[in-house]
Amino acid sequence: MTILQTRNEIIEQLTSAGIEDADSEARIILRETAGLSATDIHGRPDDEITSDIYNGIQTIIKRRLMREPLQYIYGRWDFMGLSFAVRPGVLIPRPDTEIMVETVMGRLHDGMRILDLCTGTGCILISLLKYSNGCEGVGVDISAEALTLAQENAENINNSASISFLQGDLYGTLTEMVTLITFDIIVSNPPYIPADVIDTLEPEVKKYEPRLALDGGDDGLDIIRRIIDGAPEHLIKGGELFLEIGYDQGPSVSALMREAGFADVEVIPDYAGLDRVVAGRLPIL
């Protein structure tokens, strides 16, 4: 089989299974399994692919046709230009969440302290520390599996000296020593999908990703309410809270922030123009 024939076969197989963006996934599979860049694919379409590599690709395809996410199949995924380990049981980093990091980076100054609730793979906190100077961070998650993975990612991306992870339920896990420290910034990509919506999601999400990281209760705002309510106790005066939200939750979450005393509340859209992040500042006075 040539590169072009293999690419076309992958696209046909994925498309027939109802998988969106089959062309993009074909490029990823050829890159990760065959070591072919986009230049290779388009510049050497008639080159032959060895039978071993072709068989390896077919093994990947079989798993993908079962709707297993590519991120779990390959065990890693890029986020903010960094390579994060990804495993079943922990939420997959998504491009939309990069909006959170980019927004916070615009407010981040050297030496700030960051608290990341529902840290998952650690992708938000690790990225913020990687692209800043002298900042420190604490990542919290209820899942021991997630924290093991986050620690692994921190060590691999060389942030281990400036980051620590704690297991527990939001603010309740902070030790006596940590509670004496207030944070300049709190960030979170919490569970925010309404419970009755989860079973309507694509198979990659509802079958493979952890419900604990998705389920936000009846209206999707259960965890968000708790984060907002507890944030003033753990932020410095003038500190900021950043929350990732669902596309239709901007007005509700903005209202919750204002009710909790936050000022300068704003909703930041993603690249598709959908509401993605709500930010607010704790007043100095």
Image (spheres, grey):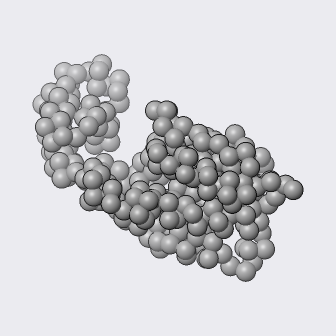
Task: Please state if 167 lies on the left or on the right of 235 as rendered.
Answer: left
Name the residue located 50 percent from the left edge and 72 percent from the top edge.
Answer: 142
In which quadrant of the rendered view does residue 216 lie?
bottom left
In which quadrant of the rendered view does residue 217 lie?
bottom left
The answer to whether any part of residue 71 appears in the image is yes
Please identify the quadrant where the N terminus is shown.
Answer: top left
Q: Tell which of 72 and 255 is nearer to you.
A: 255
**Residue 65, above or below 167:** above
Task: Please state if 41 lies on the left or on the right of 250 as rendered.
Answer: left
The answer to whether any part of residue 79 appears in the image is no
Q: Residue furthest right?
A: 285
Task: Please state if 89 lies on the left or on the right of 118 as rendered.
Answer: left
Q: Tell which of 215 and 115 is nearer to you.
A: 215
Q: Position of residue 33 (x, y in %)?
A: 28, 43
Q: Position of residue 158 (x, y in %)?
A: 61, 55
Badge count: 0
